Amino acid sequence: MAVVRSVLSLSRQRVTRAVLGACSVRAYRGNTPDDDMKDVIQIPLPPWEERTNEPLNTKRARLLYESRKRGMLENCIILSFFAKEYLNKMTEKQLSLYDKLINQPSNDWDIYYWATETKPTPPEFDNEVMTLLKEFTKNRNMEQRIGQPDLEYLFENKN
């Protein structure tokens, strides 16, 4: 009983320190003025190249997969629902624009910020597909988008 009283008398911070004292802690230090960024590793990515002569059905299937398998959950959800809604309706030109949009930028956060209009879209990506994506991201119909859509819609008989 004495142990329980002593634990209860400790502040939450002291309990946390006592429990985690032996663990290493990682902290975010942010953009400090003296940060020389030596600990950041830059991994060079090969430049994006458009796949010419790719059959349209293959391109649609690849773009569907790439829309669902992103580097961050927010884009997985937005782009997978967008792909479900629009990929089968896109022209060859629009598919190429979408391919460039989701594959050329090396940072998925850029795509997210452009789609949500948090940051301005660079001119090379500001096109009809980006306009469509921005409008889709506003979710004016208040659809529930808490996970990726199931793929059953791909196998439904379209009459």
Image (tube, rainbow, N blue to C red):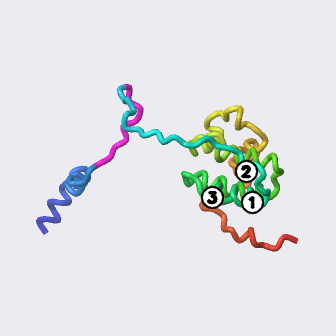
Q: Does the magenta run of residues contain 28? A: yes
Q: CA distance from mark 2 to mark 3?
A: 22 Å
Residue at the image point whose x is 75% and y is 44% from the top = 97
Magenta part mainly helix, strand or loop? loop
Does 125 appear above or below 94?
above
- Position of the C terminus by quadrant: bottom right
User: Which residue is disc 2 drawn over?
Assistant: 140
Q: Would you call the spot at circle 1 few (<14 residues within 10 Å), some (14-19), or many (20 or more)? A: few
Q: Position of residue 114 (x, y in %)?
A: 65, 40
* Local secondary structure at mark 2: loop
User: Which residue is disc 3 drawn over?
Assistant: 68
Q: Is residue 39 left or right of residue 62?
A: left
What amino acid type should be assigned to the residue bearing mark 2? Answer: Arg
Q: Which residues are magenta?
A: 25-33
Q: Earlier in the sequence, mark 3 or mark 1?
A: 1
Q: Position of residue 54 (x, y in %)?
A: 76, 54
Q: Earlier in the sequence, mark 1 or mark 2?
A: 1
90 vs 153, nearest the viewer: 90
- Residue 97 shows up from this direction: yes
> Looking at the image, which residue sits at the far front?
53
Q: Is residue 25 left or right of residue 108?
A: left
Q: Would you call the spot at circle 3 few (<14 residues within 10 Å), some (14-19), or many (20 or more)? A: many
In this rendering, the count of numbered labels is 3
